[in-house]
Amino acid sequence: MSAMELLSLLDELTLEVMHSLEKLLRESRFHRVVGKGASGDKTLAFDKAVEEKILSRITREYPDATVISEEVGVIGSGGPPFFVIDPVDGSANAERGVPFYACSIAVSSSRQLSGVQLAVIRDLTRGTLYHAVAGFGAYRDGVKISTRNHGGSSLYFSVYLVSRRSRYARMLNPQVGASIRAFGSIALELAMLAEGRIDVVADLRGVARPVDIAAGSLIVREAGGIVVDTRGQLLDAPLDPTCRLSFIAAKATHYLRRLKKVLGVQALPDDVTHSTQRVEFGT
């Protein structure tokens, strides 16, 4: 199956997920906690139902694939392709009726974040589809996007901190001079950064999971942005639901330079680049 055929499949699948979730959220029984996922977080019934729908379709179309998901963990043969799934990123928002949550699916050629070659993020409230294929750019509903779009008059950051009394919080608020938000769906925030609506998305708690950012990090990079760790190194991590990390995503390196003194991020080179390899996804 080619990359375009796979994109078509994931477009269709995530649209089905959106319609299914809309119905599930109307029923109180799907708001119950039904256990803990592989990542250690609580699993709500609607999370589980959506994941099962995605797994059923992917394992039918790709019987030899390995699936890495927030709830079920790792299943499959152990070889490529690797599907990295966050069925409902922003479950707390979905549970409370806050319209900001998404379905995130990435496809990787390896068990590393750097191996992600294709990504889709479906906004599950508006229906917007963001996607990227390594080396071919990033798109919103089929229209190419760039981090250079939608520049505002002031900085606009989404930052997740341990607490407002943390060292980062004390340093960040008075010094950066930015509007600071945390919307509750890292995947969707990264997608919005890719189209230039948010300047920086950072999770500094050391608890973000690769499944949260696998799709979003590729979309950001293909739109011209950058994703680094707190040392200023290009972000890479094992695609493991139990892995935890901190990261900073930005529209361009000069936004990182604004942060480096505040957050202790090392200076970056003048030109930070990433390499991508165009691949075909076999059945």
Image (cartoon, grey):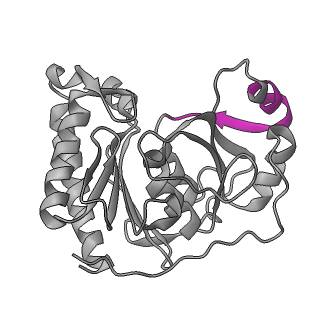
Q: Residue at x 25, y 70 (%)?
A: 8
Depth check: 208 or 199 in front?
208
Find residue 150 and report its horizontal and vertical position in percent: 62, 59
Where 131 falls versus 239 (above or below)?
A: below
In the picture, measured across the screen, residue 275 lies left or right of residue 89, that is right
Q: Would you identify the image quadrant in which residue 271 lies?
A: bottom right
In the picture, measured across the screen, residue 74 lies left or right of residue 179, that is left
* Placement of the C terminus among the 4 image quadrants: bottom left
Where 123 falls versus 21 (above or below)?
A: below
Depth check: 18 or 112 in front?
112
Please state the total of marks drawn on the protein image: 0
Find residue 25 and report its horizontal and vertical position in percent: 21, 30
| Residue 95 shows up from this direction | yes
Where 66 falls versus 25 (above or below)?
A: below
Depth check: 156 or 117 in front?
117
* Placement of the N terminus among the 4 image quadrants: bottom left
Where 250 falls versus 47 (above or below)?
A: below
Q: Would you identify the image quadrant in which residue 254 lies?
A: bottom right
In the picture, measured across the screen, residue 108 lies left or right of residue 193, that is left
Find residue 21 and report its horizontal and vertical position in percent: 21, 39
Find residue 158 and report its horizontal and vertical position in percent: 62, 40
| Residue 129 shows up from this direction | no
User: Looking at the image, which residue sits at the far front?
Assistant: 78
Residue 80 shown in magenta: no
Q: Would you identify the image quadrant in which residue 22 lies?
A: top left
Q: Residue at x 53, y 39 (%)?
A: 244
Q: Residue at x 34, y 35 (%)?
A: 38
Which residues are the magenta region?
169-183
